[in-house]
Amino acid sequence: MDLALALVGDDHGDDIALRVAQMLVMYVQRPGGQSQFSAALSLPAGNRTDISELRRWIAAHLTDDLSVAALARHLAVTPRHLARLFHAEVGITPGEFVERTRVEHARRLLERTDLTTERVAAESGLGSVETLHRVFRTRLGTTPREYRQRFAASHR
């Protein structure tokens, strides 16, 4: 796929190659070892409606307190029970899911808007530019600025 996208880029330009890559939910010439980053697409759907509902609620409330204790209160269970249920259903901890979802939202904001990194950090629920930089370095191996330069949509 990377080669095909490179050929599209050579023939039709980087903007078209980027749009094709975004439609395919993949990255143009991903660095070695870099995986897909869609929190929604990379995790099992699960069978429990309460956990599915919680996952949707998390995505809609990224700037709220999404600690395990707060999520457990939302679901009316103990934090320990929530952690067990969530891990059994989704395969990761609630905290891991929250961070993945926040990073995914930050990526979309960087791709599709001109918001400052301060606003991206705030609107994605990551809080600070320092946290935004840390999670981008850890999870994506790049900085928010480098990410935006590489993946920003051409319509901006």
Image (cartoon, helix red, strand yellow):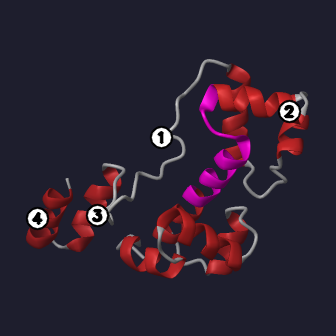
Q: Which residue is mark 1?
A: 42
Of label 4 and label 1, which has the lower sequence position? 4
For residue 10, side relative to residue 31 (left or right): left
Give the structural element (helix, strand or loop) at label 4.
helix
In the displayed structure, 108 sits above or below 82; it is: below
Residue type highlighted by circle 3:
Val
Of label 4 and label 2, which has the lower sequence position? 4
Instruction: Tell whether position 133 is magenta.
Output: no
- Between the C-alphas of marks 4 and 2, the distance is 50 Å
Q: Are marks 4 and 2 in contact (CB under 8 Å)?
A: no
Q: In the depicted view, which residue is nearer to us: 53 or 131?
A: 131
Q: In the depicted view, which residue is nearer to us: 1 or 139?
A: 139
Q: Which residue is mark 4?
A: 7
Give the structural element (helix, strand or loop) at label 3.
loop
What segment is highlighted magenta in the picture? 89-104
Q: Which residue is mark 3?
A: 28
In the rendered image, the residue lying farthest to the front is: 33
The quarter in which the C terminus is drawn is bottom left
Q: Nearer the viewer, mark 4 or mark 2?
A: 2
Q: Which residue is mark 2?
A: 80
Q: Are marks 4 and 3 in contact (CB under 8 Å)?
A: no
